[in-house]
Amino acid sequence: MWLYLLALVGLWNLLRLFRERKVVSHLQDKYVFITGCDSGFGNLLARQLDRRGMRVLAACLTEKGAEQLRSKTSDRLETVILDVTKTESIVAATQWVKERVGNRVMWLYLLALVGLWNLLRLFRERKMVSHLQDKYVFITGCDSGFGNLLARQLDRRGMRVLAACLTEKGAEQLRSKTSDRLETVILDVTKTESIVAATQWVKERVGNRGLWGLVNNAGISGHLGPNEWMNKQNIASVLDVNLLGVIEVTLSTVPLVRKARGRVVNVASIAGRLSFCGGGYCISKYGVEAFSDSLRRELSYFGVKVAIVEPGFFRTDVTNGVTLSSNFQMLWDQTSSEVREVYGENYLASYLKMLNGLDQRCNKDLSLVTDCMEHALTSCHPRTRYSAGWDAKFFYLPMSYLPTFLVDALFYWTSPKPEKAL
Ligand SMILES: NC(=O)c1ccc[n+]([C@@H]2O[C@H](COP(=O)([O-])OP(=O)(O)OC[C@H]3O[C@@H](n4cnc5c(N)ncnc54)[C@H](OP(=O)(O)O)[C@@H]3O)[C@@H](O)[C@H]2O)c1
């Protein structure tokens, strides 16, 4: 019997030992307030816990004791003078402790609030509109790239896609890959008569239901390069498609969208937030942002929602290195001999090399962009702005919030320098 008792006590002690060895986590975030730290146990405990990384708030009776303790510990450890026999001293020390631990509580609350807000947003954004199969969406620039993929994506979801292509060949190819529901029309967004005809075509299809979605996607990159190398036509040709095209198509079709209390989705770019090169492209995308912002406010009175999509760099015809570098060479050829002398052949070569390698650095997954467009069209609570691609989210957009002088410096140090640069 005694043996059983001994074994039981041994077992119990072993269990207790095992249980007690389990240590709480995140010691480095935990505050400990110790009184009587001038000497003895208090002093030793303060140093010991400090060595373990805890946040020690050490109360000493004298300034000399506090000083000596601080000299032997890390910067983490803080001291306060406390006489435990004096109420006012206890009150002051408690306030001092509160200030230290309180801040952390505030940050935790803030963190929890941000987390909760994000969760709520996620939940809200997941609510989808109903009866997608009755909803018409008109998309410009469906021959290739984002427009083409979006048309196929929405068609697969059962929506009624009205796809505008620039060429008959593009339209034919799209129709061959989609259901009979999808219809195509030829549209050149730079031509008023083409826009009028396409709007009439849309009107006939949507009837009294109105147009649920308009996606202004058609766009070109045109000539990218130093502004000084351009003439007015180089810039105007890009604005005609990317900005005036977006505006005219919108003005023409917006009564139909209002009827359906639908959506306008405008494809801008990170180039509408950060002007990283000369030419019409960035100007046009800044223009799309400005137009969309005023349009959103005006149309909110009628239940119409306007979303802006800001993709980073994706591999499509717009970022085609061969086209971009041949356009760049064309600009070089048209500039005056004085400008060529100022910039120099090395500048030309560096830029051509950079543009030629652009495709390789672009994201191949176009669905990152079309998923944003689809969300803007199908969610009950679409976002105002969608940034698509990791480069946009984590580099270009954060950069666009930096002070101008920092952004200028970054471009200055990373761009090729003209030969006659000072
Ligand atoms: N790719 C990127 O990295 C990127 C980044 C940010 C924003 N964006 C924007 O995304 C949109 C779609 O471009 P994408 O990258 O998908 O390139 P894309 O494949 O070249 O698509 C552009 C589409 O617009 C069409 N288009 C060109 N001129 C037109 C006109 N005058 N009228 C009607 N349609 C016209 C093109 O037709 P054709 O194919 O027949 O020429 C093509 O179908 C553009 O607004 C672009 O600025 C692209």
Image (spheres, rainbow, N blue to C red):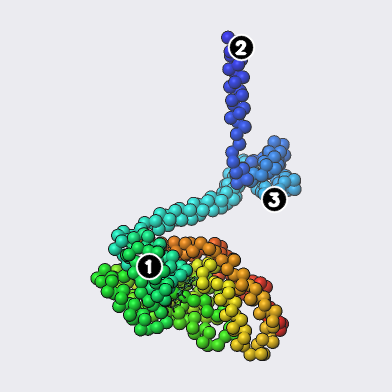
Q: Which residue is mark 2?
A: 3
Classed neighbour count for the residue bearing mark 2: other residues with Cα under 10 Å, few (<14), some (14–19), many (≥20): few
Mark linked to residue 75: 3
- Quarter of the image for residue 378 reads bottom left
Quarter the N terminus occupies: top right
Q: CA distance from mark 3 to mark 2?
A: 54 Å
From the viewer's perspective, tell me whether residue 353 is left or right of residue 385: right
Disc 3 marks which amino acid?
Answer: Asp
Of pointers 3 and 2, the one earlier in the residue sequence: 2
Question: Where residue 410 sits in the image (x, y, percent)?
Answer: 64, 71
Quarter the C terminus occupies: bottom right
Question: Where residue 353 sits in the image (x, y, percent)?
Answer: 65, 73
- Quarter of the image for residue 42 reads top right
Q: Is mark 1 within 8 Å of ligand 1?
A: no
Disc 2 marks which amino acid?
Answer: Leu
Q: Where is 74 relative to 13, above or below? A: below
Which one is in front in this view, the residue at disc 3 or the one at disc 2? 2
Instruction: Tell me what residue is drawn at x 47 percent, y 64 percent.
Output: 369
Quick one: SS at disc 1? helix
Q: CA distance from mark 1 to mark 2?
A: 88 Å
Of pointers 1 and 2, the one earlier in the residue sequence: 2
Classed neighbour count for the residue bearing mark 1: other residues with Cα under 10 Å, few (<14), some (14–19), many (≥20): some
Question: Where residue 47 sits in the image (x, y, percent)?
Answer: 70, 42
The reply to whether discs 3 and 2 touch (Cβ–Cβ < 8 Å) is no
Which one is in front in this view, the residue at disc 3 or the one at disc 1? 1
Quick one: SS at disc 3? loop
Instruction: Tell me what residue is drawn at x 61 percent, y 11 percent.
Output: 3
